[in-house]
Image: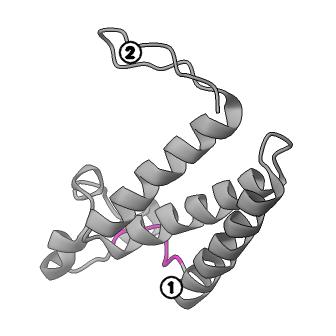
Amino acid sequence: MHPAAPPSDDETYDLPCAEALLAGSLALMTGHAQSDCARQRSLMARKVRSNLFFLAQHPGVNAPFRTVLQRMHDHWDQLVQANPVGPAEPPARLAEAADLLPETRLWHPPAERLQ
C-alpha cells in the first residue's frame, strides 16, 4: 500500500484508487451498522456490495486479498437479497415518520395523490 498524504485542514486525503474505495466501503459499513433506518441500511448495503465487487476486480489487489473480497461480496450479496429496498416515496402515516431520514420527513405525496 502507498502511504497517504498527510491530511489538510479540510480532512481530505490523497489515496490510491483501491485504498480510497476500501476506505469508502469501511465508512459505509460503519454507517450500515449504526443506522436505524431500514431504507438507508439497504441502500448502504447495496453500495458496499458494489464496492466489494470492484475491489475484488482491481489490478492493484493481490490474489489472497481478492479472495477475501470475493467472500465478503458474497456475504453482502446475501444481505442485500434478504433486505430489498422498499418504495422510494415515504410512508403516508405520520406514525412512521420516526423511521424516515430527516431530509425526507417533509416530502409531500406525489401530485396524483394530492388531488
Q: Nearer the viewer, residue 40 or 61?
A: 61
User: Could you say where residue 18 lies in the image, as x and y percent from the top left?
Assistant: 68, 39
Magenta highlight on residue 101: no
Q: Which residue is drawn at 36% across and 58% down?
A: 30
User: Could you say where residue 58 lies in the image, as x and y percent from the top left?
Assistant: 81, 46
Badge 2 local density, few (<14 within 10 Å), some, or many (20+)? few
Looking at the rendering, the stretch of residues picked out in magenta corresponds to 85-90
Mark sitting on residue 83: 1
Q: Residue at x 49, y 75 (%)?
A: 87
Mark sitting on residue 44: none
Q: Residue at x 80, y 50 (%)?
A: 62
- Find numbered disc 2 in the image and state the secondary structure of the residue it sits on: loop
Q: Predominant secondary structure in magenta?
A: loop
Q: Nearer the viewer, residue 44 or 64?
A: 64
Could you tell me the amino acid type at mark 2? Answer: Pro
Disc 1 vs disc 2: which is toward the camera? 2
Question: Residues under labels 1 and 2: Cα distance?
Answer: 37 Å
Q: Mark 2 points at which residue?
A: 7
Could you tell me the amino acid type at mark 1? Answer: Asn
